[in-house]
Image (cartoon, rainbow, N blue to C red):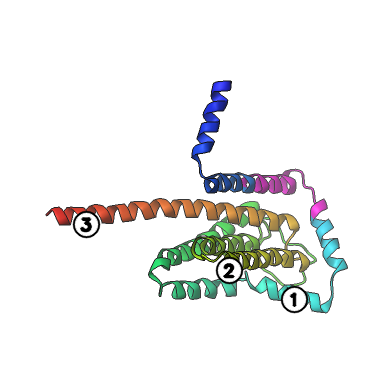
Amino acid sequence: MKSLTKRLLKLLALLSAEAVLVALTFFACLLVFGYMTREVFIQQDTDLDYAMFRYAATHRSAEMTRLMRFFSFFASADYLLVAPALIVLVMSWFQHLRWYALKVLVIAFTSTMLNQLLKRLFERPRPVTAMLEQSGLSFPSGHAMIGGSFYGLLIYIVWREVKHPLWRLCWVTLLTVLLLLIGYSRIYLNVHYATDVLAGYAMGILWLLVAIWLMKKIERWYFGRLENLGGRKLKS
């Protein structure tokens, strides 16, 4: 037992803090999504959902409703059709950001497809008290899931590329707060249950981690092939 513990400690020592954080986030998201699925479809527990609806109702006003509709727009289908394309266009001007531009397109598209697949798999109807007309199904929330992947990727890019600590912190905080307000706006407007939103966040971040990992593998393979081809040309 002691030797096994020592081996585990040695393994952890070899892992970077970033790798440990990513692994913990991955398993935390997996647990949250699994727990939300169990609560909704097996236990059929709606306590959290209606508690959040009641909380939102106590803060409802015309001004707040307009504000929540404003925040909800930033993960809407119309917005997510345009925003990734504009970001890709800007990133394409900078050589060191071009690989990120591809990631933005791939992750925005694949997270949308995965969300639609999961909605059809679970087939949970939307709340009947919705304040907006919304088509489609409810679980997991598309705004939370696709927004989680999209804004999560932007946070990842900012964290890697913005060197000034204060600016990095400002951008990460701004994007995180925006993402949280998008999720709350869906509950406030009664177009999603709280469990939809939490499951959406969990799956969005989960898919983001998987997609980044896969694209890093592809990146290494692609540039490795380029180096090999370059080496062969030099030899010939």
Of tags 3 and 1, the one toward the viewer is 3
**Distance between the alpha carbons at the discs numbered 3 and 1:** 55 Å
Which residue corresponds to mark 1? Answer: 67
Q: For the stretch drawn in magenta, what is the main secondary structure?
A: helix
Disc on res. 230: 3
- Quarter of the image with the N terminus in it: top right
Category of crowding for the residue at label 3, using alpha-carbon neighbours closer than 10 angstroms: few (below 14), some (14–19), many (at least 20): few
Label 3 element class: helix
Name, please, the residue furthest toward the left.
236
Of tags 3 and 2, the one toward the viewer is 2
In the foreground, 192 or 128:
192
Amino acid type, residue under disc 2 in the picture = Trp
Residue 118 in the figure: left or right of residue 225: right
Query: Closer to the N terminus: mark 3 or mark 1?
Result: 1
Of tags 2 and 1, the one toward the viewer is 2
Range of the magenta residues?
30-48
Q: Residue 105: x percent and y percent?
A: 47, 66
**Distance between the alpha carbons at the discs numbered 2 and 1:** 26 Å
Query: Closer to the N terminus: mark 3 or mark 2?
Result: 2
- In reply to whether residue 40 is colored magenta, the answer given is yes
Residue 13 in the figure: left or right of residue 75: left
Q: Is residue 136 shown to the viewer in this render?
A: no
In the foreground, 163 or 216:
163
At horizontal 54% and vertical 74% (from top left) the residue drawn is: 83
Amino acid type, residue under disc 1 in the picture = Leu
Name, please, the residue furthest toward the right.
58
Disc on res. 167: 2
- In reply to whether residue 107 is colored magenta, the answer given is no
**Distance between the alpha carbons at the discs numbered 3 and 2:** 39 Å
